[in-house]
Image (cartoon, coloured by chain):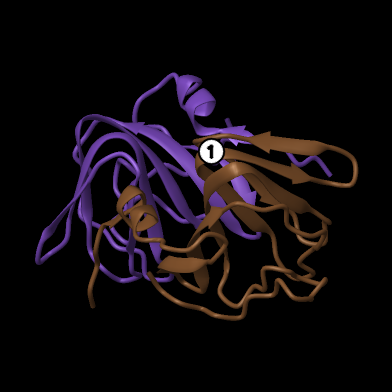
Chain colours: A purple, B brown
């Protein structure tokens, strides 16, 4: 059993590619994933789970059907299950996602941006 | 359904008392709790769940039976279920805990420091 401190700053520095998710920690069946996001994502929802976005650095907009959430560093939001959302970074945004392992990034929408890799950093 | 951005900085500023937990967000049955910790806590473990410590500001030491984890801002650790640990802040440390709702702060140990309040901030 190895219990180790995880530095978000250090891990983010190791993320070579933009728009790729990397797992940095696991709590029960939930995973913490980092991404250096530089894109407008697609509308989707997750039928079975809430999903947490935590902004480490940069700016993130998450469109809901009735409003746009605007997040910057040290801000977070929990998107409830079933709620359609469309994340969009303003330039590059460094984000930590928290969600159950196996949660697909594109949720119900599928398509080309679906990322089924589950790589640890 | 209200979906709102949560600012850790703003919420921490509203925490009047040290060593009191306040819930700031919920994801499925997991809760995010803030604490302005200024104390050495007691040895305890959680039989049924892992527990995540995320340091927002300050320094935190978490003693395990075989080593001491040292965390500062933007560092986190997941303490696996069943593992005895003893958190201790170096001065005041601002922390976000992530764990299932209802998880007792003193785990298996009980005692005077047990905090059964579940207040939102």
B60 above or below A28? Answer: above
Q: Residues within 10 Å of mark 1 (few under 14, many from 20)?
A: some
- Residue B107 image offset from top left, x and y in percent: 75, 70
Question: A18 or B32: nearer the eye?
Answer: B32
B22 above or below B65? Answer: below
Q: Quadrant of residue A59?
A: top left
Q: Indicate the chain on which mark 1 is placed.
A: B
Q: Which residue is at 29% across, 47% downward?
A: A111
Residue B69 seen: yes
Q: Which residue is at 26% across, 68% downward?
A: A83
Q: Which residue is at 52% across, 27% downward?
A: A11
- Residue B82 image offset from top left, x and y in percent: 82, 62
B20 above or below A44? Answer: below
Question: B101 or A29: nearer the eye?
Answer: B101
- Residue B121 image offset from top left, x and y in percent: 37, 69
Q: Quadrant of residue B113?
A: bottom right
Report the residue that reaches farthest toward the right. Answer: B66
Q: Which residue is mark 1?
A: B58
Placement of the N terminus of chain A among the 4 image quadrants: top right
Residue A101 seen: no
Placement of the C terminus of chain A among the 4 image quadrants: top right
Locate residue B111 relative to residue A91 in the image: left or right. right
Question: B2 or B55: nearer the eye?
Answer: B55
Q: Which residue is at 67% across, 73% downward?
A: B104
A6 above or below B41? Answer: above
């Amino acid at each position: 059993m190895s219990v180790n401190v995880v530095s978000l700053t250090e891990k983010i520095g190791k993320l070579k590619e933009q728009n790729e998710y990397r797992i940095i920690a696991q709590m029960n069946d939930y995973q913490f994933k980092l991404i250096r996001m530089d894109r407008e994502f697609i509308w989707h929802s997750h039928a079975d789970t809430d999903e947490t976005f935590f902004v480490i650095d940069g700016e993130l907009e998450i469109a809901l059907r009735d409003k746009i959430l605007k997040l910057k560093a040290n801000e977070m939001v929990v998107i409830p299950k079933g709620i359609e959302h469309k994340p969009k970074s303003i330039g590059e945004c460094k984000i930590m996602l928290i969600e159950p392992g196996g949660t697909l990034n594109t949720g119900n929408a599928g398509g080309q941006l679906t990322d089924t890799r589950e790589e640890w950093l």
